[in-house]
Image: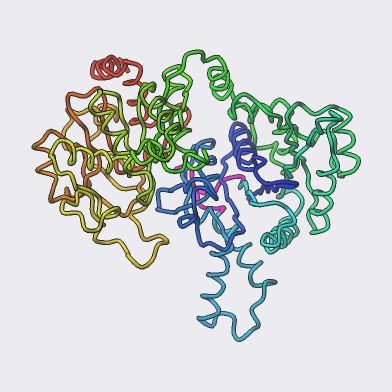
Amino acid sequence: MKYVLVTGGVVSGLGKGVTASSVGVVLKACGLRVTSIKIDPYLNTDAGTMSPFEHGEVFVLDDGGEVDLDLGNYERFLDVRLTRDNNITTGKIYQSVLDKERRGDYLGKTVQVVPHITDAIKNWIESVSVIPVDGKEGPADVCVIELGGTVGDIESMPFIEALRQLYFSLGEDNFCLIHVSLIPVLGVVGEQKTKPTQHSVRELRALGLTPHFLACRSAEPLLEATKQKLSQFCHVPVGNILNIHDVPNIWHIPLLLQNQNAHNAILAQLDLHSVATLPNLQEWTNRAQKVDGLKDSVRIAMVGKYVGLTDSYLSVVKALLHACTACSLKPAVDWIAASDLEDESAKLTPELHAAAWKTLKSAACVLVPGGFGDRGVKGMILAANYARENKVPYLGICLGMQVSVIEFAQSVLGLEKANSSEFDAQTPDPVVIFMPEGSRTHMGSTMRLGARRTLFQTSDCITSKLYHNHKYVDERHRHRYEVNPEMVDMLEEAGLKFVGKDESGQRMEIVELPNHPFYVGVQFHPEFKSRPGRPSAPFLGLVLAATGQLGDYLSQQQNGSL
């Protein structure tokens, strides 16, 4: 197994995840099989209980792992299916070591960071790296490891030491270190500054790791003089200084690396030239150029709780991009804080309230993504009501589906106090209830998580046709509450149709409203399996409906021309 380690310096948020993913894409384009590991030095066992405002979205894997959003980048870029073990956290490592200590596995020894924690890290990396994630037999050729945080952080020290030991034991030909750093330009001087990177590399070398490559983030392409200076003071050949400057869209990053001959340099470092082929990135080139050339756009109202940080809905945004690109459109996402739509907002912040409603009414479609807690739910219900009554295409995901059912019960059935027991434990008409298998005392990993099967109840529905008339679909879930099965008959008699259910037939998965251009709610999260070139079916349906193309698309598909 060959390893590529991606570290970061100077500041966080430089794009280590996209860099690591792009390196993987370039190596995969050379005919190699690639897997990925993300190391997060925080003490949480996983990302499941972390606030979206603080850490961005929680990405969910097939096996139910709640992981860092960078694993979503890996899956989208490399088209692989990772496991929860591909995300290593300090919490997981310490928990595994302490479990061994309690069992007596260390035979009375003093358990210490070195060697016990560092050995656990190395063992975890070496065992996970051989798990196939691309659907083929046998281990991958290369494992790309991203170390989260910034070099010098206290919490990442055990991982740095473990990776230093791993590098030493594997040998020079089996390990490649890429250090991502920032090359700022001071506004007054206008000069590309290398000193922050010099200090970052010095810190890394003091810890026993010397980078083979520098991936330099900058607004504009690096000047040759800047590269020469970096090479001289960072002990890295000029040819191994890669410039990842700002680009129109991130699909250009693998092409940037290829244009700088990064693949050849990495293959040489890892002694893989004998098994690699010439890189074939034509599909990526076409995709990047297509996005750059898009002129027409579609306005999408995103009504959510965490709109203050767009990374909170990163996979939803990517899924919209995939769907819009397939329709030769640019997504124009209008972010609306759900609470701004509420009547209370009209009294407290009338300007925000008016602006939110103006934005909603000017959109071609409405999307309500997932979330937890009651803040903003009344605004989501109002958005669902507006979309339903005005025949505006609507897609509700997880909470967005539950909101659409609550709104229907209140407005059509006349059950004014209908609600979810999550928001009103005393509601006389609980249309959404807590799942029987859920835990009310523990938050972490106690939801219905991971890939679950949804069976279509009829082929004569929009969602089934969008999924190419398959009898079932496997999508990823993350929820504690579900539509109350005891109220399904009443809802269906009034016109709402639950066209997708789980294998027991008791859990509602997909809801549709007939005689509406597109009013769909899904309990699962289809955004997690959307890929460039293979857009998620519900997102594609939303965009097609918003642009008046859904009918033609479905009829063409029925006729076998798609």
Which residue occupies the foreground of this view, 400 or 177? 400
Residue 447 left/right relative to 24 = left
Residue 2 location in percent, x, y? 66, 48
Which residue occupies the foreground of this view, 148 or 178? 148
Q: How many marks?
A: 0
Main SS of the magenta part reads loop
Screen quadrant of the C terminus: top left
137 within the magenta span = yes
Magenta span of residues: 129-142
Q: Residue furthest bottom?
A: 108
Which residue sits at x=73%, y=56%?
167
Which residue occupies the foreground of this view, 28 or 551? 551
Which residue occupies the foreground of this view, 157 or 425? 425
Which residue sits at x=71%, y=32%?
244
Q: In which quarter of the image is residue 377?
A: top left
Residue 66 location in percent, x, y? 45, 53
In this picture, is 395 found above or below 373? above
In this picture, is 353 found above or below 424? above
Q: Residue furthest front?
A: 347
Residue 454 location in percent, x, y? 25, 43
491 within the magenta span = no
Q: Quadrant of residue 89?
A: bottom right
